[in-house]
Image (cartoon, rainbow, N blue to C red):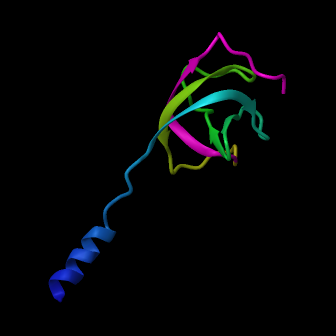
Amino acid sequence: MLRYLIGACFVLALPAVAADISVTGCVEPGVEAGCLLIKDADKTYNVTHAKPTPQVGQHGTVSGTLSEGISICQQGKILDPAVWTPDTGKSCPLP
């Protein structure tokens, strides 16, 4: 019994594994100045930290790691670090 209890404590102590995410869409401004977002179905991602920096109204793909950090943007799941790849062949509606 003690062995199982010790094993259960060990499993609970493991850190969460960071998830890698890739999202394609149009960059939108956040409610806070300088914040950048991409919406994918029912999820919103904060891509403010992506490099190179995406531009509002630009279409492309951001690939990054979900971060547990906090942001002044107060919107979306934070992707940091993240890499932005613009898609010049597609356009976005004006915000």
Residue 19 in the image: x percent, y percent?
Answer: 43, 45
> Does the magenta run of residues contain 42?
no
Residue 83 in the image: x percent, y percent?
Answer: 50, 25
Q: Quadrant of residue 59?
A: top right
Image side of residue 2 versus residue 88, left or right: left
Look at the picture and state if 56 lies above or below 41: above
- Residue at 69% x, 48% y is 74
Instruction: Give the magenta range.
Output: 75-95
- Residue at 17% x, 87% y is 2
Image side of residue 14 versus residue 40, left or right: left
Look at the picture and state if 93 lies above or below 33: above
As drawn, the residue found furthest toward the right would be: 95
- Residue at 31% x, 62% y is 14
Q: In which quarter of the image is residue 78?
A: top right
Residue 20 in the image: x percent, y percent?
Answer: 44, 39
Quadrant that contains the C terminus: top right
- Residue at 53% x, 49% y is 69
Quadrant that contains the N terminus: bottom left
> Does the magenta run of residues contain 86?
yes
